[in-house]
Amino acid sequence: MKLLYSTLLLCGVQMLASTSVHACDICGCAAGSTQTGLLALTQKHIVGARWYSQAYRSRPHGSGYGALEHFQTAELWGRWQINRRLQLSGIVPLRYNQRTIDDGTHQNINGLGDASLWGHVSVLPFSKSRVWQHYLLVGTGASLPTGATNRTSAEGEAFHANVQPGTGNVHALFSALYLFKYRSVGVLLEGAHQRLAVGLNEYRFGNRTTRSARVFWTKSIKNTVWVPHLNAQHEKARKDYDGSSYLSESGGEAWFAGAGLDVFVGKMTLSASTQIPVHSALAQGFVTPRPRLQVGVAYALGRTRKMQPVTIPTPIPTQDFAH
């Protein structure tokens, strides 16, 4: 889906022989996210891990049952800063999904998801002012079909393509990020788009777009920098294609609002955020999103060097970040 946040939409449910609606028919969890995050602004080599948790409630449709679905993703990621303007990054997701159907049935699908590779370049020059700063970063990349697409239930029945850990397809990824900061207050705007590039699998997820806005404050306390923020996010997905027709009860859009906190200590960054749904129109109204949660940790590699003050968040020297 991804304007950025890493909101990742996770997936893992079995398609039943009934006409029940699944959250994955909307979110396309295996297709993943195209968001990059605030750490794309730093000029350091970075390694990190992130964990996302989301839930959806699907109500009965036709003769089927409703269900509560939990989708979780653990990501390992890294970023190599080639020079001041160019950076390359990679993400490897692990999917953990659970579905509890109203008839008491429990279903689980876990496994490696589709890995992605990114390239980003800074377009606007760094601002040298200590009062105001702005920055523009654009990027493109691809998600690769590294996740399994042939998982089956204990009875040997194949899970639907929507709930497999991988998509079996190659997707093109695009993103743009703009930051404006005045003294200790800043605004981050981000957008991301994911679309099918090479259709290797019969089932094809609809194109996905994410837009987000974040307002943040910076506060330096001794050798630690605290960055609380408020955010709003819009996600939209086109309908999926199952090889013969578009699925009417797939795709949709949703609005979320939330808050979070980033803490920078030396080369270490700790982050946590949560979002609640404000408005949704998913699967013709048969699916309702629940609150979501994200936590992460990142570590900057190499020797610490003086950073441009606009490269926030960091890890960067406290005196640069807190101005």
Image: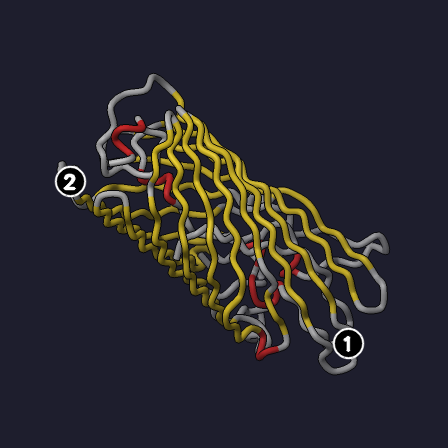
Q: Is residue 82 above or below residue 204?
A: above
Name which residue lies at 62% across and 72% down.
Answer: 287
Residue projecting furthest to the top: 303
Name which residue lies at 19% across and 44% down.
Answer: 133
Name the N-terminal-most of marks 1 and 2: 1
Residue projecting furthest to the bottom: 62
Q: Nearer the viewer, mark 1 or mark 2?
A: 2
Q: Position of residue 177 (x, y in %)?
A: 30, 50
Residue type at the position of mark 1: Gly
Looking at the image, residue 286 sits to the left or right of residue 32; the answer is: right
Q: Secondary structure at mark 2?
A: loop
Q: Position of residue 90 (x, y in %)?
A: 44, 37
**Occupied quadrant, residue 69:** bottom right
How much space separates mark 1 and mark 2, taking CA atoms? 57 Å
- On residue 175, the disc is none
**Occupied quadrant, residue 129:** top left
Question: Within 10 angstroms of label 2, few (less than 14), some, or many (20 or more) residues?
Answer: some
Residue at the spot of label 1: 64
Q: Secondary structure at mark 1?
A: loop
Q: From the viewer's side, name the closer residue of 42 and 15.
A: 42
Q: From the viewer's side, name the closer residue of 260 and 235.
A: 260
Looking at the image, residue 307 sits to the left or right of residue 158; the answer is: left
Q: Is residue 164 above or below residue 67?
A: above
Name which residue lies at 29% across and 31% down.
Answer: 43
- On residue 127, the disc is 2
Residue projecting furthest to the front: 221
Q: Is residue 254 above or below residue 115?
A: below
Looking at the image, residue 192 sits to the left or right of residue 275; the answer is: left
Name which residue lies at 50% across and 58% down.
Answer: 199
